[in-house]
Image (cartoon, helix red, strand yellow):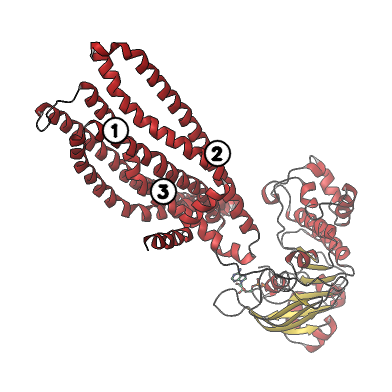
Amino acid sequence: MILSNLKSRYNAWRETHMGRLVTESFRNQGHLYGVAIAAMVIVALTSAGTAWIMESIINTLTDPEKRSQIILVAGGVLLLFTLKAVATYIQSYMLSRAGNRIVAVQQDKVFRRMVYRGVDYFAANESSDLLIRVTQGAQAARALVDTLVTGFVRDALTLVGLVAVMFYQQPFMSMVIFVIGPVALIGIRALLKQVRSIMEQQMTSLAEIIKVIQETSTGIKVVKIFALENHMIKRMDGAIRSVEQRANDIARLQAIASPMMEFLAGAAVAIVLAISALDFLSTTPPTAGQLVSFLTAMMMAYEPAKRLSRMRVTIEAQMVMVRMMFELLDQQERMVEAENPVPMPKDRADIMLDGVSFKYSDEAPVIRDMTLAFDEGKTTALVGPSGGGKSTILGLIMRFYDPNDGAVRLAGEDVRDVSFADLRHKISYVGQDPFLFATTVMENLRIAAPDASDDDIFDAARAAHAHDFILALPEGYETQVGENGTFLSGGQRQRIAIARALLRKAEILLLDEATSALDANSEALVKEALDRLTDGITTIVIAHRLSTVLSADKIVVIEAGEVAQQGTLDQLLQDGGTFKDLFDKQFGGHSAINAQTDNPEEPDTPIAQAT
Ligand code: ADP
């Protein structure tokens, strides 16, 4: 009965965050913890032994009859302290190693989960928040297991050993002390309640600090242009002050515990001395050795008792962060890979949106019951007002999101039925503001095709009109591009992205072309590179540029999540409506034929607004 009750409580505990962390850590680092715990038992025993041997030390020194035993006692002391020293070394080293392992394992695990998450996940969680959870969470996990092991094994055993010595030497005095002890605990409990909420606020403020630093660093130009320095300083000040305030609150709570215990310990010593002086109840007065041994045990018990009494406070604080890390691990994954993926058909590259509806959140749908075909080997241009849903369509095809209704089919297969690897292998994407990693140009190109030879990479760069400017960089292909490619111009970044897409040799190309960042000259170069890239490949391009619309096989006008019009340029111009309005607005008095001569001075109104 009691046993099964205990068992079910243990099982329930294992499901808690703390239980999961502890069982997992013990399973993985069992050998390290085993050695550490064995050493802790020795530390506890030798600590109690130190107090106990005081009796012999004092008595052999003060009693002339026992002087012959001095060497023996000295040997005993030496042995005890040697044992204690070795065991202390082993336990703290093993515990640190196990702890470092926990940090490594947890960070690795959280990151693995994170990197496979869907794009929606990163939209919902701010990067500063993720950063805090991953780094602090793993550290807290380590600290928590440390606290539990040292608390329950070393401190608890040491305390038991010392208390045993106390009772052995002076049972009556010990009982008096144990009436005073619990008083301390009542005070500690009161502190507990406040700690949790303070720690949670602390984490939020820490994330805010990182966010402000990140935003200042990535958005420094906006900060300067809009003279937001003061605004940023104010935000930072607020966050810093809040962290400071919370840290002070926690310090205050922790600081109360120590002196309170110290005062009680002092009071206990005073009481013991008074009792021994009064000498009532005791028929034979204690020897000096017994009294010293008792006092030593009591004073040595102070440290582990203090740590144990603070353990709950410490654990509460650590649990807050551990919980935050587990929340991150446990969040429901919305984009799940098919369990038994069907193979992606090899030589088909057509795309079909089949009655697709999609919304990002609970609000109005962004794509409404859209059926749209993209023919193999052809270029389809998406045009229409900003916010109409064009980028979302590309996102759905790449399966950054799943439709709420209908299906996206690629080569005839529902994209949810194929593996992520197969799907993305088939697709290249060049966005408006291509992301570059903070490494060399070469590395940035190579990520697209790790097996490509240097010559392949140079060829791709040539085709993308990037080779020449790359060679002109201070260290050519080995030049560092800076965080997100800040050392390069928009046009240069885009041409590197195009070279990257060329290297992929994918059958489908998704392009969110942007001209806004480019001057006329680099725009012409990018366009030429793109033409090369799209040749014979199934291409969907969000067209910001008139020339793209002119050379597309099909034009689709997307408005408010629906297909407003589709057809060839001629058809759409004949039909009139949204496209013709957009087109006329862009060209003013010009005819389509004039426009085809690729006038570098782009008209002011773009066909699609950059989002
Ligand atoms: P377009 O590319 O035509 O400018 P988008 O597909 O980018 O349009 O956006 C369509 C709509 O979806 C817009 O109203 C936009 O505000 C919204 N939207 C885009 N991305 C997200 C997102 N990650 N979360 C919530 N809403 C979004």
Residue 535 point in image, percent of width and height: 89, 68
**Residue assigned mark 2:** 97
**Residue assigned mark 3:** 243
Vertical order, 305 against 501 (above or below) = above
Which element is circle 3 on? helix
Q: Nearer the viewer, residue 124 or 514?
A: 124
Which element is circle 1 on? helix
Tell me what residue is drawn at x 86 percent, y 50 percent: 467
Q: Is residue 55 visible?
A: yes
Which element is circle 2 on? helix
Q: Which mark is residue 165?
A: 1
Q: Earlier in the sequence, mark 3 or mark 1?
A: 1
Q: Which mark is residue 553?
A: none
Tell me what residue is drawn at x 38 percent, y 21 percent: 76
Q: Amino acid at mark 1?
A: Val
Q: Amino acid at mark 3?
A: Val
Residue 300 point in image, percent of width and height: 31, 31
Tell me what residue is drawn at x 87 percent, y 65 percent: 531
- Disc 3 vs disc 1: which is toward the camera? 1
Q: Earlier in the sequence, mark 1 or mark 2?
A: 2
The quadrant holding residue 1 is: bottom left
Vertical order, 149 against 489 (above or below) = above
| Quadrant of the picture in which ligand 1 is shown | bottom right
What whole-number distance in Å separates the C-alpha atoms at marks 3 and 2?
30 Å
Tell whether circle 1 marks a residue whose Cβ is less than 8 angstroms from ligand 1. no
Q: Amino acid at mark 2?
A: Arg
